[in-house]
Amino acid sequence: MTKISDGSSGSKRSEIAGIPTRYIGIGVLVVLAVWFLFANLDRVKIQFWVFTVTAPLWIALLATLLAGGALGWLLKGRSAK
C-alpha cells in the first residue's frame, strides 16, 4: 500500500493572517500589561523589610512584572517531578 501525502502536516501550528497565534497571545498580554501600568500612576509607599520608599505604583508593578518574567524564563526548562 502506498501512502499519498497532500503536503499538509499534522503538526502545523495555528496562524492568523500568517502570524503564529503564540505571538498574537504574547502581543495581547503585553498591551494589557502596559495598559494596566498606565492605569496605576499614583504614588505609593513601598515597605521593604528595613526601609520604606515612595514611588509611582507603575514602577513597582513593572518591577514585579519583570521579576516574574525573569523567574519564568529561568525556570522554563525544568520538568515537573
Image (cartoon, helix red, strand yellow):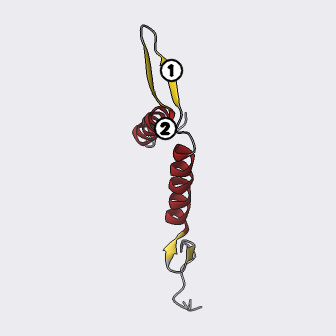
Query: Total number of numbered labels?
Result: 2
Looking at the picture, how far across and down is residue 68, in whole percent?
47, 36
Lower sequence index among marks 2 and 1: 1
Say which quarter of the image contains residue 74.
Answer: top left
| Residue under label 1 | 45
Looking at the picture, how far across and down is residue 40, in whole percent?
56, 39
| Residue under label 2 | 58
* Depth check, front residue: 55 or 18: 55
The residue drawn where x is 53% and y is 48% is 33
Q: From what the image shows, is residue 14 above or below residue 42?
A: below
Q: Residues within 10 Å of mark 1 (few under 14, many from 20)?
A: few
Q: SS at mark 2?
A: helix
Q: From what the image shows, is residue 67 above or below residue 2?
A: above
The quarter of the image holding the N terminus is bottom right
Looking at the picture, how far across and down is residue 79, in whole percent?
50, 39
Instruction: Determine whether, in the image, residue 22 is placed left or right of residue 51.
Output: right
Q: Between marks 2 and 1, how big is the CA–CA gap?
A: 12 Å
- Residue type for callout 1: Lys
- Residue type for callout 2: Trp
Q: From what the image shows, is residue 43 above or below residue 36?
A: above
The quarter of the image holding the C terminus is top right
Q: Outermost residue toward the front?
A: 42
Looking at the picture, how far across and down is residue 25, in whole percent?
56, 61
The residue drawn where x is 57% and y is 72% is 14
* Depth check, front residue: 72 or 46: 46
The residue drawn where x is 42% and y is 7% is 50
Q: Outermost residue toward the top?
A: 50
Q: From what the image shows, is residue 1 above or below residue 58?
A: below
Instruction: Determine whether, in the image, residue 49 is placed left or right of residue 11.
Output: left
* Depth check, front residue: 34 or 14: 34
Q: SS at mark 1?
A: strand
* Depth check, front residue: 5 or 2: 5
